[in-house]
Image: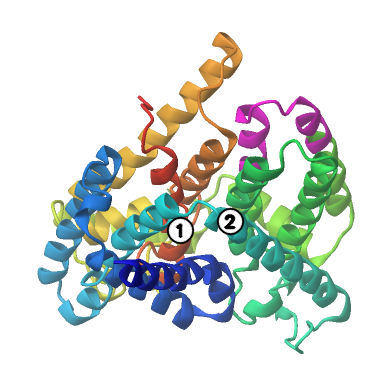
Amino acid sequence: MKLYLNHQLKINKFFEYLVILIPIFLISGPFLSDLSISLLSIYCLFIHKTYYQHEKIIKFFFFYLITFYILILISSFLAEDKFLSLKNSLFYFRFVLFSVCFFYLLKNNEKILLKLFFVLILCFSILIFDGFFQAYFKYNLIGLKINEEYLGSRVSSFFGEELILGSYLTRLFPIIIGLGYFFFKFKKGFNFYLIFFIFLMEIIVFLSGERTAFFLFNITLFLLMVLLNDTKKISILSILIVSIVVTSLIIHDGPSKKRIINETIKDLKPKTYNSEFVIINRQYHEHYLSAVKIFKDNILFGVGPKNFRVICKNQKYNFSEYTCSTHPHNTYVQLLSETGILSFILIFSLFLLVIIILFKQFYYKFFKKEIFLSNLEICILIHIFISLFPFTPTGSFFNNWTSIIYYYPVGILLWLFRNKKIL
């Protein structure tokens, strides 16, 4: 029996390190991160069900997302290009199993979170330093050149041609803040380091040239300042720092300003094309218009994951050379066109559920003067909120890298909510 337990501990330790190292794997590319998720999901199948069968939150989560999985699987079997669609949807369940596995590992050893915090600190520190280095010298620490495009230079650090530095930092930012509060809230100097960290993040996300990431980062800051418990001083200093940084960046007429400020103002101005009102710009407008037309003809199950790129070429849905793309560049428009109304309802209702819980935190904090959620719970919910935020252009919902980012903190949230009534 002792030998068995030792063997089990060693196995658990291996999978714990897989979970902890995922932020590093995400920087290295899709292969290692996807391999880790796959191995963790397989391990979940071998975990005895007694470890989580009495957890109501796991049952709800599992039923909810397996229902979503079944719906996208049906969509794939009905798709025009079944192989392309099934390539993404067939093994989508691994993300659900990964979250359950993360929950199980945390239930057995919550010290994983402390190690994860230090791994995230390491990743963020290297990326931020390397980002500033690349912005100044025009190449990063390993010789990757700064990305040059028609609007100027964009910092990408170790991501190279993949312009996702801002997205990576913004999406994982709430997790690192939540874990910081979880372990170091009462440590001397924590507030100073937090403010300095926010200052550097604001600049580097701006320099990445990712408009959506910059917008969501500042939405995140606003929500953190409003919803976190006992953060009056940090909120005031954060507002001051963000105001100074943003004002300075706007005054400085650099390439990032041209993309993030000038182009955004240009896109937000009301405009028409052939007497028709255009949303954001003509390219996005035609993506959305085509996707909505596709949805109207395929209301229940859509045309299948990854099949927008195939169907948008049809004359009925194609308006010009701007219409087609790999995906419609908005999560909910993509869900409607590729997987139908039922899948859309499941994911959008999850977004609404997060809003309700965060609003409850706001009510308890300002009206009842009580603590409803811990700061770590608030931060994880904010991560989900910005991931599912409907009013920005997004990457493909079924992209593996994006899915890992979305699902990564879900296991932590399940662990936090396991004994808590949230509604």
At mark 2, the secondary structure is helix
Give the left or right position of residue 378, taking residue 96 as reference: right
Mark 2 or mark 1, which is nearer the start of the sequence? 2
Q: Is residue 231 left or right of residue 31?
A: right
At 74% across and 58% down in the image, what residue appears? 206
Q: Which mark is residue 179?
A: none
The answer to whether residue 255 is magenta is: no
Q: Which class describes the residues within 10 Å of circle 1: few (<14), some (14-19), or many (20+)?
A: many
Asked whether 202 or 212 is in front, the reply is: 202
The amino acid type found where label 1 is placed reads Tyr
Residue 43 position, x and y percent, is 30, 70
Relative to 249, residue 81 above or below = below
- In the displayed structure image, the side of residue 193 where residue 266 appears, left or right: left
Q: Identify which residue, 31 or 261, lies in the foreground.
A: 31
Q: Tell whether label 2 touches label 1 (CB within 8 Å).
A: yes
Amino acid on which the number 2 mark rests in the picture:
Leu
Q: Quadrant of the C terminus?
A: top left
The image shows a total of numbered marks equal to 2
Is residue 350 placed above or below 49 in the rendered structure? above
Position of the N terminus, as image quadrant, is bottom left
Q: Give the residue pinned by disc 2.
A: 172
Tell me which colouring the rendered structure shows.
rainbow
Instruction: Please state the extent of the stretch shown in magenta in the rendering.
Output: 218-238
Q: Is residue 299 above or below residue 404?
A: above
Tell me the residue that label 1 is attached to.
408
Tell me residue 367's x, y (percent). Answer: 56, 10
Q: Quadrant of residue 91?
A: bottom left
Q: Quadrant of residue 331?
A: bottom left
Percent x, y for residue 182? 62, 41
Query: Was residue 230 drawn as part of the magenta stretch in this picture?
Result: yes
